Amino acid sequence: MDRVSFDDVLGTNYAPLDNGRRSIKTLVQSMEELSSLNQVLSPSPARCDKLHDSISAHKALLTRAQLLPPELLSEIFTHSSLSESSGSGRAGILLLPHPRVSGSPLKLGRICRRWHQIALSTPSLWSAITIPKNWNIEGLQEWIRRAGSVTISFSVDVHQQKREVLRLLASHQSQWKEVVMHLDTSQAGRQLSREFLETLSRSYGNLQTLDIRLAHPDWGWKQPRNGNTDIELTLGIDSAPHLRSLSFHAPDFKMVTLNTLPLLCLREIRVDFDPVPVEEFLTLLRLSPTVEVVDAYLLPQHDSNDSSHEIATLLNLKDLEISEEYVGDSEGHYLCLLEKLASPALERLCYSIADCWEWIQQDMPTHVPHIKPFIHRSRPPLRELRIQGYCIPAADIIYCIQFLPNLACIHIYDVAMSDDWDEVIQLLTGPIPPSDENLSGCMCALLNEIHFGQGNIVSPDSVINMILSRSPVGNQKLSCVTMLSCSEHDVLTHPKIMDCVANGLKFRGSDTDPWGGGGSWVS
């Protein structure tokens, strides 16, 4: 039977059928006509307000959201919450929702009674949280209770005021999915971290992301390993079978990996605070054949029998950023990561030798690292190459460029000043004029960004020839060129170079500072 009145369902979650919707539309139209008439004949504010409220309440019954079943609304809520908080922010930190009334999921529960009930009965909405520093334990208990049995993700500061919070999180260890821990590196903070880890079991059955970093990232950087690791976390192969992302950005923290099968499912590895021995890191890589991103700070080791170390081939690795400690002792052979690695799918390589300038000044003998065996072995579709280190020779770069046809960006800085870097520029210089008006005729034809630092001594004439050979008419290839050992004036006075600048080229060189500081983009 069709309704003649809807007063008893106003303000509820009632969802009318087609006949009911037509009736409501007719009632709303009649009330709107009456409202217009009342404003003329009886302009009583109270009566008008009451009529407008009744119109709004009837219109609310017609909203499309009323027709959505609870299961679909629950799914929409979950996706809206993920879109607000998922992914990685600055410095790769995992973004998780904050318990704020202005954001999901708390905001969803403040719309109406129906949405409030649906939000409370959707465990996935409560499965992730950034735990506030001064939040009471009752708030976290209620949040986790609403998550029920689903996996949980959290970001927490490990400090004395949160002992109860840490105990509560430890009791739900089997549900951990994505975890970010911010450590206090004070003596008390290290002791608390150790106590917290000791309360955990060796099982991380649902863990997919583990990110351990400093609570205050400006407290030093890449401090030398003292030989005694204060905090140790054992992640055996069987204890974290679903681990995808592993990041250590804190000192005196070490992961011990059991060198046994089955293999790990890691996609991303970042260890960039304390230098990790190369042999130890190679073990981790061999157990992670599907890894795609690696960012590591490594310590080369004496290798008395380097033939015993087989090459680790990582077929899925696309982004490799390696910083290795400088080795100032040439006795014996040093094991460096690139010497024992093959990455045929690599698209980005950043390689640097850290803290070596002091050794160079003292004329200390050194084991010189080479990247060319790695490039020759891998033949990768590399698009970005960044090299830094005073002991890396220009000959290595000259050799590697010939095997990198897809190279689009090359950054070379803080390298051996005694080398002839003009040869690198000449290698990147094509025939003049170009062989075809649409092709540069140059090696690495896709190259559009070149950066040479102050140590790469090159002549202005070589730079000019290189730019002109890579800038055919109608097909501007180079977009950014930085040559900090060249005077901007010497390059930009060439009329054809200014034509390139007019067509979009950005050039940066040195000014009066002999070390190349103070140069500015010219475009």
Image (spheres, grey):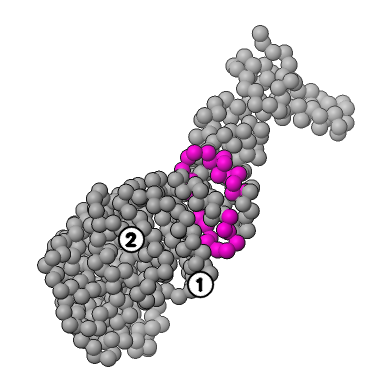
CA neighbours of label 2 inside 10 A, class few (<14), some (14 to 19), many (20+): few
N-term mark: 2 or 1: 1
Q: Quadrant of the C terminus?
A: bottom left
Residue 358 image offset from top left, x and y in percent: 31, 87
- Please give left or right for residue 160 compared with residue 178 in the image: right
Note whether residue 425 is visible: no
Measured along the vertical axis of the image, is residue 459 above or below residue 284?
A: below
Q: Identify residue type, mark 1.
A: Gln
Picture layout, residue 513 above or below residue 430 = below
Residue holding disc 1? 187
Residues in magenta, as a range: 139-164
Q: Residue at x 27, y 59 (%)?
A: 284
**Circle number at residue 236:** none
Q: Quadrant of residue 375?
A: bottom left
Residue 128 drawn at (x, y percent):
51, 47
Distance (Cα) linking label 2 and label 1: 22 Å
Up the image or down, 40 lies above or below 18; here it is below
The residue type indicated by label 2 comes to Val
Looking at the rendered image, the quarter that the N terminus falls into is top right
Q: Residue at x 13, y 71 (%)?
A: 305
Magenta span includes 519: no
Q: Which residue is mark 2?
A: 256
Helix, strand or loop at mark 2:
strand
Q: Position of residue 338 (x, y in %)?
A: 21, 67
